[in-house]
Amino acid sequence: MPLVVFVAVLGLRAQFASRATLPDDAFITYRYAANLAHGQGFVYNRGERVLGTTTPLLTVILAAARRIGCEIPNTGRVIAVIASAAGAALLVAVALAATGSVPVAIGVAVLTGLSTYEAQIGAGGMEPPLLVAMMLGSFLLLVRERYAWGALLAALAALTRPEGFLWWALYGLYLGGTGKLSRAALAAGLAPIAAWFGFALVYFGSPLPHTVVAKVLQGQSPMARLTQPWQLFAFALGRPRYLPMVLAAPSLMWRHERRLALPLLFSAIFLAGYQVARPMMYPWYGAPLNAMLGLTLVFVLDGALRLWEAPAAGGRRWLHRGWTLLVVASFLLLVHSRAQLHWMLLTQAPPPEWRQEMARTVGRHTGPQDVILVGDIGYLGYYNLDRHLVDTYGLVWQAPRALMAAAMSQVISDQFVSQAIAAVQPTVYLPGMTAASLAPPPGYAIERWPDLPGWKVLRRTAP
């Protein structure tokens, strides 16, 4: 069954991916991979050792693919689509291995296959699908008592995205608390982490991605405070229709399946961490939580079906059956909503691709000696590898903290422009269409590009 699910979901994800555009953030990692493949080092700008990507593992994989002649954007999309389909198949394999219930396996297969959220994340060419596949794969190995291999996958999840470190830590604690942490599992779980930390400390000076610091500071801006983490995660999970199933989990956890503590504890700490740090939110941040919902549903559905068949007398019997009906009804509502959204996404017109052309436009009007300051640096950076690009958000350079904190304010002010220019002293600055009314600071003049209508470009006039 997992193989059938993999093939079916792969077809759905590929169909959606062929109609979607890659997000700008994906190309930041792509530029790191391109520079690494071309022998320039693990850098965004040549000669500047700043860790501005949160996925070292995917960066290395993409760089290796480029070395053998594969195009990085296409490879990134293929990896994400395959990982998304693998995640669905792994969830079904967990259901079969942990519960032995074919109805539960079919249920989670349908739910995962129709997930519009996972389809969108899979089409994005980024690391969340790979992270989810690593996490689910390690849980499957835990269920099958392959603890060393599971610890290795958990460690690789930690190198795929920062949230993976939480999974890796909880995974190790679970093995230790249950007496399953053998020497082989300990070595397998620590070796990749130690290797990366050692390299990052020597090469970058810190294993903490600079993007994490920047986005936490951005989260203090007025725009970020308007976006609550709970709203984005509720969208990822499927809105309130999932609540009866999740609320059933704690009471089923200790009675039926102790391993359910792992996804539940991860979800609780994950949400609490984001609520406290309040970084600037992006939709793909909810991918691990969506995977934890899938693991939770495996055991909640199985527990509900067991309650239906469990011997009980009088009112307790009807209480058990009522609870089962509530869980199944909420599950069917969630499947129905996902089917509707999935059909809508597959039938709507694909969005126009404009960022790639814009990147080439910037390349035509600038030279390799120019320093370009701009907000979004994904497409611009990847399609202009010989340009020195600096972002106003402070993701790939050591920007002043005050500048990073102001980068996501709702209004681009003259004061912010002056701060950004003073910090970078760029040759060219593209504030964007929203800054059309700003006056140029001293030493800069307005420049209009006919092939970039509506944008204000500031070019340095003084040496």
Image (cartoon, rainbow, N blue to C red):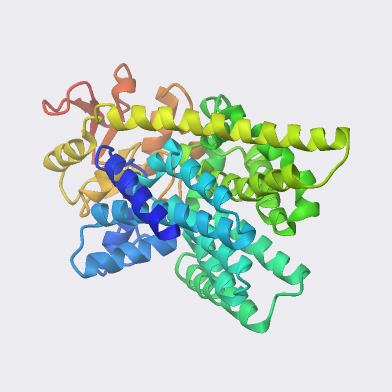
Query: Between residues 345 and 110, which one lies in front from this camera angle?
Result: 110
Does the rendering let one see residue 51? no
- Residue 272: image location, x then y, percent: 69, 42
- Is 437 located above or below residue 301 in the figure? above
- Is 432 located above or below residue 375 in the figure? above
* Quadrant where the C terminus is found in the figure: top left
Furthest residue toward top: 437
- Quadrant in which residue 35 is drawn: bottom left
* Quadrant where the N terminus is found in the figure: bottom left
Count of numbered tags: 0
- Is 279 located above or below residue 164 in the figure? above
Residue drawn at point x = 61 percent, y = 59 percent: 100
- Residue 447: image location, x then y, percent: 18, 27
Residue drawn at point x = 27 percent, y = 42 percent: 15
* Left/right of residue 266 with respect to residue 213 in the rendered view: right
* Left/right of residue 373 with respect to residue 152 in the rendered view: left
- Residue 62: image location, x then y, percent: 31, 62
Query: Between residues 30 and 123, which one lies in front from this camera angle?
Result: 123
- Quadrant in which residue 120 is drawn: top left
* Left/right of residue 441 with respect to residue 244 in the rendered view: left
Query: Between residues 54 and 198, which one lies in front from this camera angle?
Result: 54
Does the rendering let one see residue 92? yes
Query: Between residues 275 and 128, which one lies in front from this camera angle?
Result: 128
- Is 221 located above or below residue 114 in the figure? above
Furthest residue toward bottom: 183
- Quadrant in which residue 251 is drawn: top right
- Residue 25: image location, x then y, percent: 37, 44
Residue drawn at point x = 52 percent, y = 68 percent: 153
Residue drawn at point x = 32 percent, y = 43 percent: 377
